[in-house]
């Protein structure tokens, strides 16, 4: 039985990765400090450690875990928090990340799969952005994720630690949080289904490359067999405006709310769309969900959540 450690496995994406690895017959351990993650997201069959990735006790987890692969998803991922408190962001994403890499080196882990982000590109200058797009992040969050990518190249060169970097577009799906800096899909669903006002910031013409969480999970599974220690975008390559997203979600929820516009949010990216041809050709990954089908699955989750 193969053994996997998932950091951030109580979070939105990490808990889906955990479910999928367990379905494939993996033994799974999760480290998460429940900063934004929820205990109820942790699958019953996974061994759970409520722990910060900076903790020295990570050593014991690695010593006993004998992991074949590490999926690193734990992160401070709130862009505005990273602007307000860049040191806190760097503590979790860089110092925590280095602690993890030191463990991987010490216990000779075969591969790390890292969840990186479109935020590492900053304001895009070409659309869709390929992996070779300049990486000039517009936030401390984007900087720390990019920094960790660079550490991966260093640990490969110096210590032979293999990796795959997955740079996600905007991910949505069941279990995404709608509070704090939650994703736009989660916020719209919770508000529209509960009959509350959902606001559009700016003119609604800003675009996002909305990618379903199940497709991100597949990319994580495929990455374990990929021998190329490189970065791969995980995205649909389709741009959707917030206005058209609102219209689709309004239909799906049966809401009669008209669009309500608010002043634009400072520092918000106007266009975001990633080119996924590299992962399509090298891993034969394809998104299995278009926006309609992904949103329909997500709506089921939020309906059930509101009823419970
Ligand atoms: N959701 C997206 O659209 C998106 C896009 C690009 C990249 N990502 C990346 O994917 C990963 C997962 O994101 P998510 O959307 O599931 O977010 P999430 O907040 O649900 O998951 C992150 C998890 O990490 C945990 N965590 C945070 N700091 C920690 C620490 N110091 N020690 C241990 N655990 C810690 C949190 O409690 C949480 O469970 C992150 O690395 C994020 O940067 C997400």
Image: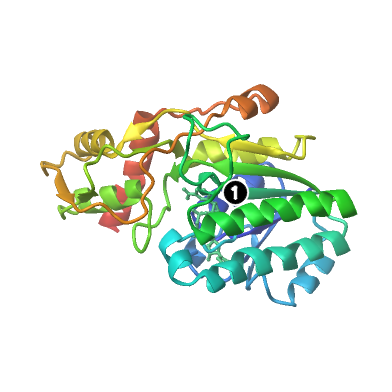
Mark 1 close to ligand 1, CB under 8 Å: yes
Residue drawn 49% across and 31% down? 126
Residue 96, given in percent of the width and then of the height, sits at 66, 68
- Residue 49 appears in which quarter of the rendering? bottom right
- Residue 175 visible: yes
**In front: 35, or 181?**
181
Q: Is 54 placed left or right of 117 in the picture?
A: right
SS at badge 1: strand
Residue 241, given in percent of the width and then of the height, sits at 30, 35
- Tag 1 residue: 116
Q: Is residue 276 above or below residue 77?
A: above
Residue drawn 49% across and 29% down? 128
Q: Is 175 placed left or right of 110 in the picture?
A: left
Q: Is residue 13 above or below residue 258?
A: below
In the rendered image, the quadrant that contains the C terminus is bottom left
Residue 298, given in percent of the width and then of the height, sits at 37, 42
Residue 137, given in percent of the width and then of the height, sits at 53, 51
Residue drawn 56% across and 73% down? 87
- Residue 177 appears in which quarter of the rendering? bottom left
10 Å neighbourhood of mark 1: few (<14), some, or many (≥20)? many
- Residue 72 visible: no
- Kindly give the residue lying farthest to the bottom in the view shown: 56
**In front: 28, or 118?**
118
Q: Is residue 20 above or below residue 263?
A: above
């Amino acid at each position: 039985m193969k053994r996997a450690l998932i950091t951030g496995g109580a979070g939105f994406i990490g808990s889906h990765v955990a479910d999928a690895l367990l379905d494939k017959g993996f033994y799974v351990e999760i480290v998460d400090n429940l900063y934004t993650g929820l205990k109820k997201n942790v699958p019953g069959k996974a061994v759970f450690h409520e722990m910060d990735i900076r903790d020295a006790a990570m050593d014991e987890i690695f010593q006993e875990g004998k992991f074949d692969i590490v999926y690193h998803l734990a992160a401070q991922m709130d862009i505005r928090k990273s602007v307000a408190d860049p040191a806190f962001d760097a503590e979790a994403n860089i110092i925590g990340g280095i602690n993890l890499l030191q463990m991987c080196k010490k216990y000779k882990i075969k591969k790390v799969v890292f969840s990186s982000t479109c935020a590492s590109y900053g304001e895009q200058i070409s659309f869709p952005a390929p992996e070779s797009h300049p990486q000039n992040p517009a936030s401390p969050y984007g900087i720390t994720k990019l920094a960790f990518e660079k550490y991966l190249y260093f640990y490969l060169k110096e210590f032979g630690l293999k990796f795959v970097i997955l740079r996600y577009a905007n991910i949505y799906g069941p279990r995404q949080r709608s509070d704090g800096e939650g994703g736009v899909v989660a916020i719209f669903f919770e508000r529209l289904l509960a009959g509350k006002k959902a606001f559009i910031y700016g003119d609604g013409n800003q675009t996002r490359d909305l990618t379903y969480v199940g497709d991100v999970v597949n990319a994580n599974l495929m990455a374990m067999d990929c021998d190329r220690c490189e970065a791969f975008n995980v995205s649909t390559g389709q741009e959707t405006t917030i206005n058209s997203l609102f219209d689709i979600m309004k239909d799906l929820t049966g809401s009669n709310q008209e669009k309500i516009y608010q002043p634009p949010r400072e520092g918000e990216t106007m266009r975001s769309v990633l080119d996924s041809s590299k992962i399509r050709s090298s891993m034969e990954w394809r998104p299995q969900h278009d926006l309609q089908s992904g949103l329909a699955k997500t709506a089921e989750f939020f309906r059930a959540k509101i009823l419970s």
